[in-house]
Image (tube, rainbow, N blue to C red):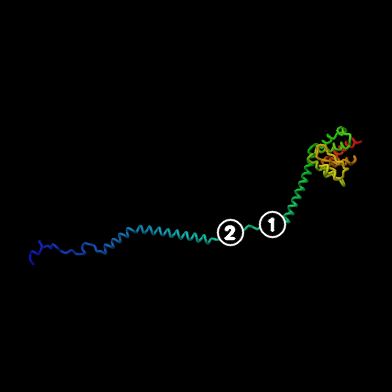
Amino acid sequence: MSTSDKPAGGASTNSPVSPNSSSPKKGESQQTNANHSEEQTSPVAAQHSAVKSNSAAQSNSAAKSNTAAKTRPSVKAAAKPAVSKAPASKVTAVKTAENKQASSTSQTQRADGANADALSHDKNDILDLVSTSALSTFTKRVDQFLFVLSAAHKLNADSFERVESIKGKNRTYFATSKEALLENGSSTNPKAIPDSAYWVVTNNNTAKKVSMLEQVLRQLGYTPEVIAGVVARFSSEGK
C-alpha cells in the first residue's frame, strides 16, 4: 500500500458507524409512541368508563323500581255495603202513619193554642161586655143571643172555629155560611153572628139557646163560674 492511501496522523478518516450505536430501532420507537399515546388517553377513557358505570347503575335501579311497582299488590277500594230498600208498601204505610201523627199533633197544638188564647186574657172580660145594661138594649131574645155570641167571638176570634164542633142529633148549629145550615132544613132560620164570619141556627127555644151558649163558652175555655154568670144575665133578661 502506498503512503498516499493512509490518512494523515495515522487516523482513518472514514471509519464506519455501527448501526446500533446512536439511532434507535424502529420497533422501539413505535413501542415508545404507543406508550405515550396510552398515557395521554387513559384519563379520558377512565372518565368514559365511570359515566358508563353510573348509567348502568341508574338503569338497574330504575328497572328494579319498575319491577317492584309492578309486583306490588294493588289495593282495591273497599266495597260499599249494600243498602236494602224497604218495600214501597211499608214506606207508604210509614209515611201515612207519620202524616196522621203530624196531623194529630197539629190539631192538639191548635187546641192547646186555643186554650192558651182563652187564658191569655182576663177570663172575666166577657162579663164586662155582656153586662145587664148592654143586654137590656135589645128587645128580642134572638138579638141578645147573637150579641153574646158576638162578644165571645170578639174576645176569642182565633179559636172561635171550635164552635163548629157543636152539633145536635140531626143538625149543625154553627157554620161559616148560611147555605151550610140550610142543608139541615129551611126552618133552621140561620142568622149571621155580628162582626164575624159565622152563622148560627136560631129557630130554637130559650132553654136550647142557653145550652148552646154554655157549650160555646166551654169550648173557648171559660171557667164554670164565668159561664154561669153570662148565662144568668142572659136568662134574667128574658124573664
Q: Quadrant of the C terminus?
A: top right
Q: Is residue 127 above or below residue 102?
A: above
What is the crowding at mark 1: few (fewer than 14 residues within 10 Å), some, or many (at least 20)? few
Label annotation for residue 8? none
Residue occupying image coordinates x 59% and y 58%: 77
- The type of residue carrying mark 1 is Lys
Percent across and percent down for residue 121 are 79, 37
Above or below, 211 relative to 16: above
Where's residue 6, x and y in %? 10, 64
Mark 1 sits on what residue? 85
Q: Quadrant of the N terminus?
A: bottom left
Image location (x, y in percent) of residue 186: 87, 43
**Foreground residue among 62 and 201:** 201
Q: Residue at x 29, y 60 (%)?
A: 33
Q: Position of residue 145 (x, y in %)?
A: 86, 38
* Residue in the image at 10% along x and 62% along y: 7
Report which quarter residue 224 is drawn in: top right
Q: Give the mark count.
A: 2
Task: Indicate left or right for 159 with 236 as reference.
Answer: left
Q: Is residue 158 left or right of residue 63?
A: right
Q: Secondary structure at mark 1?
A: loop
- Contact, mark 1 vs mark 2 (Cβ under 8 Å): no
Q: Which residue is mark 2?
A: 76
Residue pictured at 58% horizontal, 59% vertical: 76
Q: Give, as a three-letter code, the residue at label 2.
A: Lys
